[in-house]
Image (cartoon, rainbow, N blue to C red):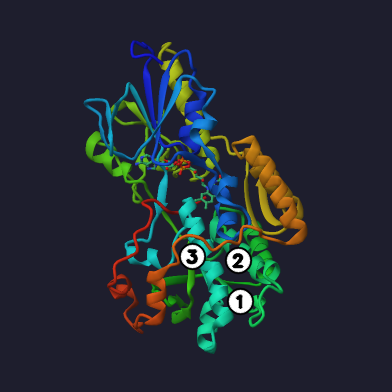
Amino acid sequence: MTTDDKRPHVVIIGGGFGGLECARSLPPSDFRVTLIDSRNFHLFQPLLYQVATGGLSPANIAAPLRGVLARRKNVSVRMGEVVDILPDEQRVCLNDGHVDYDELVVATGVRHNYFGHNTWEQFAPGLKTVEDAVGIRHRVLEAFERAERATDPGELHRLLTFVVIGGGPTGVEMAGAIAELARGTLRGNFRRINPAHSRVLLIEAGPRVLAAYTDASSNRAMRSLERLGVTVWLNTRVVDISASMVSVIRNGVRHNLPTRAAIWAAGVQASHLGATLRDRAGATLDQVGRVIVEKDLSIAGQPHIFVIGDLANYPHQTGEPLPGIAPVAMQQGRFVADRLGLRYVDADFIPFHYHHRGSMATIGRAAAVAEIGRWRFSGYPAWLAWLFIHVLFLIEFESRVLVMIQWAWNYFTRNRSARLITGDVDAALSDRDAKPAPHPKSNPGNAAAKAPSKPAKPKPRRSAKATQ
Ligand SMILES: Cc1cc2nc3c(=O)[nH]c(=O)nc-3n(C[C@H](O)[C@H](O)[C@H](O)COP(=O)(O)OP(=O)(O)OC[C@H]3O[C@@H](n4cnc5c(N)ncnc54)[C@H](O)[C@@H]3O)c2cc1C
């Protein structure tokens, strides 16, 4: 690309499913493209739970953006954090400079939502980034290590209790995978404890797990979870989380669940660029900060700014926002690329329409539920379909082969070979363990105020799970 290049400059913020698909779909002869991401890789988030439970390594589910786009000569990758957008100047500001655009596509996704209880994040991390997954893996595996040397029965019980909060696809996957780890993979690995005696609890505020699926599928998922040894508590609300326990209200009764490993999979909020677009470009946001977009995915009154993927709320198809899933983001990415192409040849405008091809959630080894068109199936066939589709969508060929081999190996041996405790051994958490936070017994409504005043350990900026 040269500086006298006359092709319109499309800047895409976010190299996730939406942004990457858009970059790949823009015709090279018509546009030069800059893809900006704060990370240098595309992350296949649907398999993060495998990293969090030692089944796969981070590199199996991530692909360097420069490598993925190497053959797209019209696309440049810029690594950097976008901190501001100036629509009047058609400029994107990064933490280390700026980039000017003719057309802007914002695809920065979502992060966790703790519904105002932000102090909970340090005790119950969510699953959104590689760091989150490695941190959770660390926490889960370390709990077994500590249990092996625990002498106090109460402490042993706490260490072998795992609480997953949120019964959507991520919560179901995580709970199932931890149960399999405890009951299968770790069998015979310890001398003093029996990991199979672990308690895995899945807490869901609503009346069923996998609420976006049919009753039949969610009942099947419940049965599969129970077969794996997961205890599911429905209609149960979390009111407090501390270093040593998760407190819930169930049937009007408060239960304090001692645990060292709680995982948050209960909600999302939009990336901070949603608020930037509201302040700078007059965008309207929904309750979780997503940008309500027009029928062509642009922002009202800003025909040169498009918002796609999890960050966008597209209400024009069903009256409800489309689900935060990868196919929506990818179809929107392709749509914006086509739309930009058409705009420059003055073609008629057709609104975005999402084509739903099906939903699948996995619960464990050879257990999944699938809803594809009018077909509803579960168990081994659903799991095989899930496996095939997820591996197929892994972006890099090399990853596909590696993941396939690793999975086949794990399946036959029940092994999870990436069971490494790496990174910073959580010193802050050890301190908290030594002196468990005093736990209030009443006034659950003021839970956030009761969390320990010790500042949270700094975490990577984004984290979360998409509601699917
Ligand atoms: C644990 C988990 C499991 C999931 N399972 C499934 C599943 O089974 N099936 C399914 O269809 N969907 C699943 N999803 C949802 C799916 O991953 C999302 O819908 C999809 O990633 C949304 O794509 P996106 O492009 O909108 O955002 P993302 O893929 O989240 O990408 C956003 C990108 O923006 C970058 N970014 C953010 N802020 C900035 C900034 N300020 N500056 C620069 N870059 C920035 C990020 O680094 C990231 O690369 C899952 C999600 C999670 C977290």
Is 107 placed left or right of 100 in the picture? right
Residue 23 percent location from the top left of the image: 47, 27
Mark 3 lies on residue: 263
Residue 306 percent location from the top left of the image: 37, 30
Q: Earlier in the sequence, mark 1 or mark 2?
A: 2
Q: Quadrant of residue 400?
A: top right
CB-based contact (under 8 Å), mark 1 and mark 2: yes
| Distance from the alpha carbon under mark 1 to that under mark 3 | 15 Å
Residue 463, compared with residue 372, is above or below; it is below
| Distance from the alpha carbon under mark 1 to that under mark 2 | 9 Å
CB-based contact (under 8 Å), mark 1 and mark 3: no
Q: Quadrant of residue 34?
A: top left
Judging from the image, what secondary structure is the residue with disc 3 in?
strand
**Label 2: few (<14), some (14–19) or many (≥20) C-alpha neighbours in 10 Å:** many
Establish whether ligand 1 lies closer than 8 Å to the Cβ of label 2. no
The mark total stands at: 3
Can residue 466 be seen?
no
Judging from the image, what secondary structure is the residue with disc 2 in?
helix
Is 130 placed left or right of 53 in the picture? left
Mark 1 lies on residue: 198
Amino acid at the residue labelled 1: Ser
- Checking the image for residue 178, the label placed there is 2
